[in-house]
Every structure is written in structure tokens, then in C-alpha cells.
Amino acid sequence: MHSNNNNRWCLVVHGGAGKYRLLAQGICSPQTYLKGIEEALQAGAHILQQGGPAIDAVVQAITAMENNPIFNAGRGSVLTQAGHVEMDACLMDGKSQQVGSVAAVRRIANPIQLAQKVLYNTEHVLLCADGAEAFAQTQGIPLIDPQTLITPPRQQEIHQHATPEEWGTVGAVALDQHGNLCAGTSSGGLAGKHPGRIGDSAIAGASTYAQNHACAVSTTGIGEYFQRLCTAFHICLLYTQGMSIEEAVQTAFHQIEQLGGRGGLIAIDHQGNYFWIKNTPYMARGVITPDHQHITLH
Ligand code: ASP
């Protein structure tokens, strides 16, 4: 477990657990991923260091990764069997315990921003597909040409039989100066997924969970396992029952592994202690606090 002794603010982000085919093919270097993580950390840290809310830090950090085509979220999302982008995102505010999620959206540049609108401006938790996109228009979020989200490497993957564990998802967890926790996750889902398949990245309690005075969690990996085990909620429950953040993560992730699941996750508690875990070759990730920054890929 990593401690954050100053107990002020902390942001942890991940760029997905997987095999990172772009690395293997030499299309992207490790530095490209580390830089993408650093940009996400900076986007969120900028808000936290000024005393801004954890929810805004999480949304800005994830927005930076959605806009970066090396990550499987927003532009650069993987494609379904039918060759479309269908994206999921979830945001949970630890203070209010409110959730905003979107699923299977195709024409949204930043699904995490739409999830934030669902959280703030509806009575609902999750909007999907056409209904979510119609809601976006009422919120001033433009519908874009879905082709602009598709990058050449993703287009080629359709013919390369990418396995589900090639990529990842992006996510962030934050603790702000006021003690509020937030978690968010955004994803293009699994490469070659069935059209209409909704992953854990849209589901509060599976990929994403935040509760003030406890912890915040964001997962990545083969989402069906995290959905079946309600992993993000489970970690929070174990924490409230007395486990440390490290013990809670290890216990819940062990259950994922027992079912044969692959992936990883990041978690932070209300004291700013954080822990991350994975069982894939890579998970780009990083942490930033007022006096510390650490970024890693392996
Ligand atoms: N968890 C995501 C999903 O299953 C994908 C990933 O993180 O690799 O949709």
C-alpha cells in the first residue's frame, strides 16, 4: 500500500490493463503511454491543487485520455464485430453517492462528460444508446460523426482477430482537499464485442464506485467478470468492514482471478492511501499528490 501522509489531495489514473498491441507492433512507444498518463494527471491535479472538487478532477483526467487516440476510450475506441464504436462510461460522486452513466453511445466525443450530465441533470443513473444521445443534445453536447472516433489501427484490428484482452479502458479516482472522493471510468469496451454488449465501464458497483469516508475504485479488464462480482462495490464494502485498501483490493481481485478474469484496477481511500493491481502485461497508470508523482506501465 502507498501512503499519502500529507492527507491533502490525491489523484490516481489508469489507461487500461491489457497486452497493448500498439506497443507490440511498434506503433506506440512506452513513452507515449507514460506521457498520456502524465497529461491526464496534470489535467486533474490542476483542479485539485486549487481546492476544486474531486468530481471535476476525475472528469478532466478522463477527458484527456478520451481525447488521446492511444487509449481505448473516446477517439481511439475499439470496434464491435459490426465495425462500430460503442462506448460506455460511469461517474460516481462519493459525497452524494449519485451516479451518472452512459452505455453504447456512438456519437459522443467525451462520454464521461455526458455521464456527468446524467449525474447532475437527471433522476436516472444510466442512459443508453439513442436515448443517451438525445439527452446529450438537450445538454449542449454535440453529436459527432462516429467515423471521427475511429483511428486507423482500430480499423485494421477488425481483420486481425484482436482478443478481448488487447486493450483496456481509462479511469480515475480522486480525493480532494475537502475530503470528497470520486471515481470514473470510460471505455470503448472489448475489441470485437457483440453489438449492443454493455461492459462494466457503464455499471456503478462493477467498474466504478465511490463513497466518502471509505474509498473510490475504477477497474479495467474483461468487464463480464467485474460485473458478475460487483468488484468496485465489493472493495468498498470490504474497506468499510475494516480491511485496509490494499487488503480489500487483493481480496476482491483474488475472486476475479479465481473465475479466470483478466484486468486490473486502481483504488484510493479517504486518507489518500492508494493501491493498484493487475494480472495483464501492462496497465499504464500514475498517481499525483501535492509532493509526489509516479507513473508506470508494467
Ligand atoms: N472493462 C472494459 C469492458 O469490459 C474493457 C477493458 O477495460 O479492457 O468493456
Image: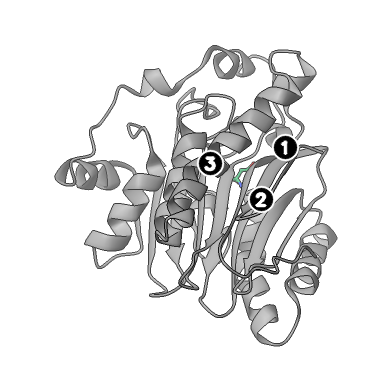
> Is any part of residue 230 visible from this angle?
no
Q: CA distance from mark 1 to mark 2?
A: 24 Å
Mark 3 and mark 1: Cα distance apart in space:
28 Å
Query: How many numbered marks are there?
Result: 3
Which quadrant of the figure contains the C terminus? top right
Label of residue 184 in the image: none
Alpha carbons under labels 2 and 3: distance apart: 10 Å
Q: Name the residue beneath numbered marker 2.
A: 287
Label 2 or label 3, whichever comes before in sequence order: 3
* Residue 21 x %, y %: 73, 23
Residue designated by label 1: 165
User: Which of the two labelled residues, at mark 3 and mark 1, occupies the earlier sequence position?
Assistant: 3
Give the answer, above or below, for where 191 lies relative to 267. above
- In the structure shown, which secondary structural element does the residue marked by tag 2 occupy? strand
Figure quarter occupied by ligand 1: top right
Q: Nearer the viewer, mark 1 or mark 2?
A: 2
Q: Which residue is mark 3?
A: 42
Position of 184 relative to 87 (above/below)? below
Where does residue 136 sit, x and y in percent of width and height?
A: 23, 43
The amino acid on which the numbered mark 1 sits, given as a three-letter code, is Glu
Pick whichever of labels 1 and 2 is earlier in the sequence: 1
Q: Nearer the viewer, mark 3 or mark 1?
A: 3
Residue nearest the viewer, comparing 106 with 26: 26
> Of the residues shown, which amino acid type is indicated by label 3?
Gln
Question: In this view, which residue lies farthest toward the left?
Answer: 138
